[in-house]
Image: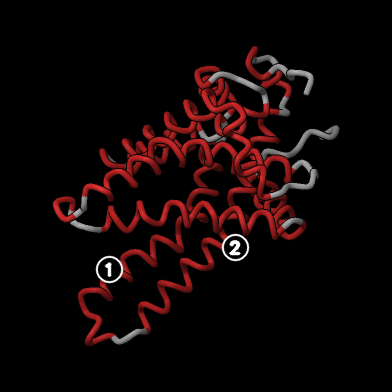
């Protein structure tokens, strides 16, 4: 392949796993921080909307509309740095704030499209995520505006979205099991005891500490391989910036 990273799903997963093994501490710590910040959002969304206090809506809005989009870009920058063999640190998680406008714009657009698509129907949300995933890396890697990063992602992921869905599926399976299990336990806790709760907690811990760092590193590997392809270099937005 003349030094050009493979676009094979197996190579993305393998490279992501090797990245995780080589630099577990920054990836795990950043994953924990992101999940701790987003935890209030999930707790509040689990409640009945009428029961959410005013301060809860403030926390929810701050997390979803301001903090999470920029941290998502920093997370992707950290992952890409690690995938490319540079030493990543948890400080990289906050690197999106150095280009707040483009980082926030890209992050918020991808999140809104994905969550909006999920609310309308699950499939559109997944398709939009796989289409625009690479913009989360490109906005800082190529120093692009949000609009250019989104256009670039749509172009370079064409023909590869099925493989990106494969990474998405691996990333979400444990949570897809844990979430309904936890809700079922809430309704039957007296009959079921603590075993279903323990299983759900273990699955979530595995997701946060292993699955998320690994599969997100695989996504970074996917971006790095797709942006390196000869056809991607013909896209104006993909031109190296000299960094």
- Give the percent coordinates (x, y) of residue 118: 32, 42
Residue 158: in sight, yes or no?
Answer: no
Q: Quadrant of residue 22?
A: bottom right
Q: Which mark is residue 210?
A: 2
Of residues 151 and 5, the one nearer the viewer is 151
Q: Circle 2 sits in a helix, a strand or a loop, which is it?
A: helix
Q: Could you tell me how many numbered marks the image carries?
A: 2
Q: Circle 1 sits in a helix, a strand or a loop, which is it?
A: helix
The mark that comes first in sequence, 1 or 2, is 1
User: Could you tell whether 216 is left or right of 126 in the image?
Assistant: right
Residue 181: in sight, yes or no?
Answer: yes
- Give the percent coordinates (x, y) of residue 101: 52, 23
Query: How would you rate the neighbour count of disc 2 (Cα within 10 Å): few for under 14, some for 14-19, many for 20 or more?
Result: some
Tags 1 and 2 in contact by the CB under 8 Å rule? no
Of residues 8 and 144, the one nearer the viewer is 144
Q: Residue at left 67%, top 38%?
A: 7
- Give the percent coordinates (x, y) of residue 195: 37, 84
Name the outermost residue toward the top. Answer: 236
Which quadrant is the C terminus positioned in?
top right
Please name the residue that numbered disc 1 is placed on: 183
């Amino acid at each position: 392949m003349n030094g050009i990273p493979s676009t094979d799903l197996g190579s993305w997963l393998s490279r992501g796993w090797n990245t995780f093994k080589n630099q577990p501490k920054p990836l795990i710590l950043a994953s924990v921080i992101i999940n701790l910040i987003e935890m209030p959002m999930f707790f509040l969304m689990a409640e009945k909307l009428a029961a959410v206090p005013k301060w809860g809506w403030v926390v929810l809005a701050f997390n979803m509309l301001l903090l999470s989009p920029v941290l998502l870009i920093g997370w992707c920058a950290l992952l890409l740095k690690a995938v490319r063999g540079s030493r990543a640190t948890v400080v990289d998680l906050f690197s999106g704030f150095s280009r707040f406008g483009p980082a926030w714009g890209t992050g918020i657009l991808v999140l809104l499209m994905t969550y909006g698509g999920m609310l309308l129907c699950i499939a559109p949300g997944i398709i939009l995520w796989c289409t625009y995933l690479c913009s989360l890396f490109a906005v800082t890697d190529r120093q692009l505006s949000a609009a250019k990063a989104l256009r670039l992602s749509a172009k370079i992921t064409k023909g590869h979205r099925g493989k990106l869905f494969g990474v998405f599926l691996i990333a979400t399976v444990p949570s897809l099991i844990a979430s309904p299990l936890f809700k079922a336990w809430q309704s039957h806790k007296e009959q079921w005891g603590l075993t279903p709760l323990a299983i759900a907690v273990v699955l979530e811990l595995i997701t946060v500490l292993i699955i998320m760092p690994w599969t997100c590193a695989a996504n970074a590997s996917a971006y790095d391989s797709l942006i390196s392809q000869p056809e991607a270099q013909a896209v104006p937005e993909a031109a190296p910036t000299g960094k």
